Amino acid sequence: MADPVSLAASCAMPPVLSKSAVAPGEVKRSAHIKMDSYNVGAVAPYQAMPVAGPVITHHKSTALPVVEPHPEMTAEEREAQIAEMIGSYMKKLAERTHHHMGYPYNLDFDYGLLEGLTKYSINNLGDPFIESNYGVHSREFEVGVLNWFARLWEIDEEEYWGYITTCGTEGNLHGILVGRENFPDGVMYASSESHYSVFKAARMYRMEAEKVPTLESGEINYDDLKAALVKNAGKPAILNVNIGTTVKGAVDDLDRVLEVLKEAGYTEDRFYIHCDGALFGMMMPFLSRDAPMVTFRKPIGSVSVSGHKFVGAPVPCGVIITRFKYVMALSSDVEYLNSRDATIMGSRNGHAPVYLWYTLTRKGYDGMRRDVEKCMRNAHVLQQMLESAGIRTMLNELSNTVVFERPKEEAFVRKWQLACEGEIAHVVVMPNITVEKLEEFVADYVQSRARVSIAAAKRVACEAKAAEEDV
Amino acid sequence: MADPVSLAASCAMPPVLSKSAVAPGEVKRSAHIKMDSYNVGAVAPYQAMPVAGPVITHHKSTALPVVEPHPEMTAEEREAQIAEMIGSYMKKLAERTHHHMGYPYNLDFDYGLLEGLTKYSINNLGDPFIESNYGVHSREFEVGVLNWFARLWEIDEEEYWGYITTCGTEGNLHGILVGRENFPDGVMYASSESHYSVFKAARMYRMEAEKVPTLESGEINYDDLKAALVKNAGKPAILNVNIGTTVKGAVDDLDRVLEVLKEAGYTEDRFYIHCDGALFGMMMPFLSRDAPMVTFRKPIGSVSVSGHKFVGAPVPCGVIITRFKYVMALSSDVEYLNSRDATIMGSRNGHAPVYLWYTLTRKGYDGMRRDVEKCMRNAHVLQQMLESAGIRTMLNELSNTVVFERPKEEAFVRKWQLACEGEIAHVVVMPNITVEKLEEFVADYVQSRARVSIAAAKRVACEAKAAEEDV
């Protein structure tokens, strides 16, 4: 970065913006951020992931201050300085994009043709199917993309409602809200390896919730689910089914969940199923193997996926598709939303639908299938490479998420932006991850392990020498 | 648009994506969309605005299907066709951006220097102050912008917490959630002219809510507020204070609200105030007149504004600033969010902070003040022009929103993208609205009124002639 601090130091804000002093007894933010970056066990670098430790223990972000024009600097000099700052930021983005393995984001996209779109403030505020008077929108692309997903998950255009969301979390928040509005006294069920937004929703919406244990694979424990359902038999069930968990990429078996519901005595009018398909929900339909398909031909209520994950986009986004009859519980109640708007957010990013439309149109169904196949193939390649190098791994059958022991070197974890939870790390093999990149990664990891081993051996030797001297 | 329909018609989706039939008794979406665009009273073109009529009565969006590659079309032909579709969409965006008056969006921005950012999937997932392992983020810009707003609203950097949101709605959802978590049995109070997301929040969060009537200006009725507070004296109060309502731009007087709370017997440990500053919250600090300032020197809990409104950005976004001590109620409870993430969304748009940082840095404090002054001046110019043309208007003292009778011609409303509610329309005079544009608009409006008047007169004449013939 081009020295923002010295620029900031010389440029005070105008006097009207005086600082208020911290009153005695106030809670200070920085006191809650632990700066110890060496205690690998204490930090949980995968933000927005479940944690078990203290709340805020991680690295503090730096700030790039908004700096006032300097009286001794010409407008040209200032513009040049800003351009330099943006330029070095772009270089950082390029480097960080190159060394990325941990998050399920497809960073391989080319939206060059769409660059001019950032000249416009595109906003699909409100319902995608109802035109707003704000004309700078992209509803035609949005509805086109929604129809594509409706066909993917086999629901008639007349039967579904949905929208392009801000992210996977908004999809989960929406799906669970629709469930609650249809079953106001329903109990929510989700596995303990569900995305944290699922239990966040239950707390936000003041719903009773059951956290169901998982199997070793990360799938929900079907026996425990059944026991919980039987226990609460008097109340309807709102279930979150994971189509690929965040950490292990485990897929809850929808067919078995439906069976368990039946066995526990729940008829179709007494449950609502939301499928959290964050990454894998849009990969699974392209798999040829005998997978428990997610489809609206089964009695599910909603499916959500992220758009920036498998499809890939510069902005986070997602898709939620639900049955129109269910969403009526939200939108028909004018007192509820006080609007015809059944979305969670009011203003909605209008660029995202164009990105999604563009990629789906350019790649086509076959292109998407090829991407899925490549990811599944390369995930196996990575697993085999790691195993052959003596590193133990786990890879679920229906998954492109390769799980292994968390590397000991924090610098290595950060270099490759690995997503970690506790002692586990993972690589999600996305379309932008080539075999060459996997090779580079594994070689680097082996080196890192060697350094850690040598350091450990040296410590032993050092202690032995010290003991010898003491003798 | 370049004929997407004919392209679509010839390109079926692959057979695996077969359609499910609509089961008997299913609810059809299109049956709930009224296509009658002539019944001006029944339609409410300002999506994401309060409505009183039936739920879905507005114009249906068209879809631009995601089309599969055509076997008889070369790759080049296909690319050219897609480029042509995007090209004509861009032309539409340019035209719609030019004719825009109704929404409080500043469409005057130049982010040319930042165009390369769309090459990267920038995501500030989780807390802005805690680094994630995902390296392609813009936290340095985000924290810089948050610090700027903290100074604007006079709260020490150590005392606040906040983040850059998806839109104004997310700011309101967050502020009210923080209020509820601090006062779980609190009753929410907001005026009936509040943004609809405020009551949406109360319903989502299962909070008791009081809708307080307004004065003619659109401000909250302070006497009614007091009566409601006294009625619920046993429970803490969570108040939404409007810093500029959506329709009339009315500003609730924060000082009077604080006085009313005192009179009703509420001490500072028994209320939480969220200020919804959507548009005006960031204009008010720049006004020199004697306005009831929004500042954290007063006992408020949070302030939110939109970023795409006054600052202007290609993507919807917003800012929420709250006291860190209050947000601890969310983030310290690990069981709650099951994460250290106290935001509502998980993944967050990383481009928005760079846009905001760039505009605030380039314009500086003085530039922002000049923009505010220009808007206030031009709002008065518009009011005077309309009044001099015989059109009755309303303009609150602290507002750039000019309210007038809803034009009778729907085509005119749509051409200028006027935001309407019931019989009221408004123009929000933003920095991109010049006096020349106002002149064009008023002349066009006068012509529209003339056409309506002539048509009305003709109907009378026609009826008179028919009556004559009957005689």
Image: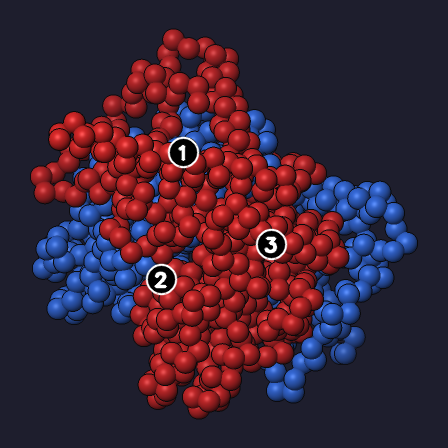
Chain colours: A blue, B red
Numbered badge on residue B380? 3
Instruction: Write down the quadrant of residue A339 in the picture.
Output: bottom left
Crowding around mark 1 (Cα neighbors within 10 Å: few <14, some 14 to 19, many 20+) is: some
Q: Name the residue under label 2.
A: B200
Asked which secondary structure carries label 2, the reply is helix
Which comes before the other along the chain, label 1 or label 2? 2
- For the question of whether residue A225 can be seen, the reply is yes
Q: Which amino acid does label 3 sit on?
A: His
Say yes or no: labels 1 and 2 on the same chain.
yes
Measured from the top left, where is residue B103 in percent x and y?
50, 48
Q: How far apart are marks 1 and 2 (CA)?
A: 40 Å
Q: Going 37% across and 42% down the picture, which residue do you hit?
A: B408
- Mark 2 Cα-neighbour bin, 10 Å: few <14, some 14–19, many ≥20: many
Identify the secondary structure beneath mark 1: helix
Q: Which mark is residue B451?
A: 1
Q: Position of residue A149 (x, y in %)?
A: 33, 36
Q: Is residue B324 something that shows in the picture?
A: no
